[in-house]
Amino acid sequence: MVEEDLRRVAVERAYREHVDDVYRVAFAILGDADSAGDATHEAYARAYERWDQYDALRPVRPWLQRIVANVALDVIRRRRIRPIAPLADDGERTAGVADRSADPAGAVERRELVDQGLATLRPTARAAIVLRHYYGYEYAEIAGVLGTTPGTVGSILSRAHAQLRAALSAAGEPRADAT
């Protein structure tokens, strides 16, 4: 029973320290607050079940983010349809589009355009963009989450960047060197 108590305490601490980041990954992939909350809950349940697989010599946050990314992708696979709703602004991310003016309305509009562009991507492409540009994962780490190779991640990101550039260009946003 002592091991069970230690596991519970460790997961509770991980929850307190990282739940916001875990939720943001889920929300960025799913684009829906309720689904992201459910995915976050499921990710922590999986973390609890698999705590013995966690390498204590590595940071826990990326491990949790990988779990929630996989949970979110599972949710999308189960839906068998891609959500069309734009991702909401969390006030922190711009997906590589720099705010080029001091006009707050313009910055909000650009973030909304990027979020709408992200919503048009396939789920795996959206996950790759989120993990790479919002959280700074390397290609090999993204490949581990998506169950593919780093070369395939590069291809996914290249196509996703091109699709986002086209969407931003069509919406009147000047081309940025942010990808």
Image: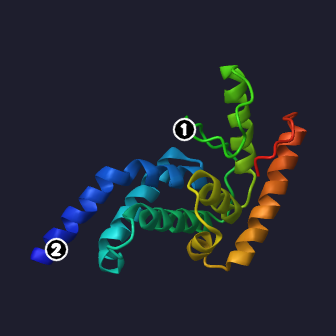
Q: Residues within 10 Å of mark 2 (few under 14, many from 20)?
A: few
**Residue drawn at x 41%, y 60% as measured from the top left:** 61
Q: Residues within 10 Å of mark 1 (few under 14, many from 20)?
A: few
Q: Amino acid at mark 2?
A: Glu
Residue 90: mark in rendering: 1
**Residue drawn at x 34%, y 66% as measured from the top left:** 45
Q: Of helix, strand and loop, which one carries label 2? A: helix
Indicate whether 115 appears above or below 148. Answer: above
In screen coordinates, is 7 left or right of 19?
left
Residue 49: mark in rendering: none
Residue 51: x and y in percent read 31, 74
**Residue drawn at x 71%, y 37% as measured from the top left:** 98
In screen coordinates, is 53 left or right of 104?
left
Indicate whether 172 appears above or below 83. Answer: above
In screen coordinates, is 166 left or right of 47?
right
Residue 131: x and y in percent read 59, 59
Residue 167: x and y in percent read 84, 45
Quadrant showing the N terminus: bottom left
Residue 17: x and y in percent read 32, 51
**Residue drawn at x 45%, y 55% as measured from the top left:** 22
Residue located beneath label 2 in the image: 4
Most foreground residue, 82 or 48: 48
In screen coordinates, is 15 left or right of 82?
left
Where is residue 42, by image quadrant? bottom left
Q: Amino acid at mark 1?
A: Asp
Most foreground residue, 157 or 50: 157
Instruction: Tell me the CA gap for discs 2 and 1.
Output: 35 Å
Most foreground residue, 114 or 41: 114
**First in sequence: mark 2 vs mark 1:** 2
Where is residue 93, by image quadrant? top right
Indicate whether 17 appears above or below 5. Answer: above
